[in-house]
Image: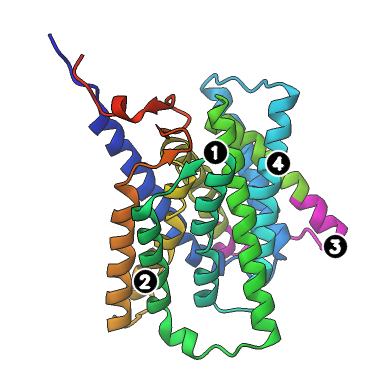
Amino acid sequence: MAVRVPGDRRKMRNWMLYVVTVLVWGSTWLAIEFQLGVVPPEVSVFYRYAIATALLFAWCLARGLNLKFDRRAHSRFVLLGLLLFCLNYIVIYHAQQYITSALTAIAFSTMLWMNIFNARIFFGVRAGGRVIAGALLGIVGIVILFMPQIERISLSDATLYGAGLCVLSALIASLGNMVSQSTQNDGLPVMQSNAWGMLYGSILTGAIAFGQGQEFHFDWSLAYVSSLLYLIIFGSIIAFGAYLTLLGRIGAHKAGYAVVMFPVVALVLSVFFEGLEITANIIVGVMLVLLGNIFILQTRPKTRAGYEETGAAETRRPLHLAADRVR
């Protein structure tokens, strides 16, 4: 009796991973606001990933997952921690001291383009016309969303410096995406890779904070502790697990569109919790971002050799064999 390969079920799981990533990271903008002020940014990032590391290792041990890897794997984990769980956050925190959240959202959304170019360089993945069109729609949508704030921005040296830091952070994050995709292509599991990566990232962040002479004090207020717990459990463990799994399945060029969706979620939350007024800019901007989202996530890229890029979970297959088949 013929059965059908459950491709639709897999696609649904990918959509669920994407939605979880966007909703959680889109909401962390509010949580991060409660982290600023009392504790230095580097120290807060250190607390976040040190505790996340302990929880993730405990979860892996409880599940009986293998945590022993060779030196080559650990070299990848160190690089993953340095890029995704250390430098990326330190640079973006400092960037936001000079620029508004609007300019931050626009500058960091350049990670989408960086993922497209880096995927081409490191993995030979051709994005295709629909992906490029979707990326353009998304960036234009973000600009329209924040047009009122952009019009009030003065291009001072501080603003340009902050925007430059934000673009640098996007580049660091994109390179971290490439490292994660490479580890998954080599068969290294996402959760254990994240556990080791967060461990190395927290150690490196703590070393940077210590080298800067910052004090490791703690804010025991309800706002700081509750936001820290949210960032640890949802923003670090769940969202990174979902995003990096998705990255391995559909590629960095597609998964990277999530950075364009984050500001949309943040704006929706602002409407409900901060009384933000819905304007024509918001409506048009959201529609363009969502349209770009559809363009990107419904395309299949090709590698240089003319093969479908299916990510780490599957092998590369010739395009004429890539569709689900009756066996």
Quadrant location of the N terminus? top left
Membership of 221 in magenta stretch = yes
Precedes in sequence: disc 3 or disc 4:
4
Q: Amino acid at mark 3?
A: Gln
Q: Amino acid at mark 2?
A: Gly
User: Which numbered circle lies on residue 141?
Assistant: 2
**Of residues 193 and 203, the one drawn nearer to the viewer in this rendering:** 193
- Within 10 angstroms of label 2, few (less than 14), some, or many (20 or more) residues? many
Where is 149 relative to 302, above or below? below
> How far apart, in angstroms, are the residues tagged by discs 4 and 1?
18 Å
**Of residues 157 and 272, the one drawn nearer to the viewer in this rendering:** 157
Precedes in sequence: disc 3 or disc 1:
1
Where is 14 relative to 25, above or below? above
Q: Amino acid at mark 4?
A: Leu
Dot 1 corresponds to which residue? Answer: 123
Give the quadrant of residue 172.
bottom right
Q: Who's the residue at 69% across and 51% down the image?
A: 86
| Residue 218 in view in this figure | no
Quadrant location of the C terminus? top left
> How far apart, in angstroms, are the residues tagged by discs 2 and 4?
33 Å
- Indicate left or right for 5 with 134 as reference: left
Helix, strand, or loop for circle 1?
helix
> How far apart, in angstroms, are the residues tagged by discs 3 and 1?
37 Å
Q: Return the x and y of residue 161 as percentages of the image width and height.
A: 69, 77
Membership of 2 in magenta stretch = no
Precedes in sequence: disc 4 or disc 1:
4
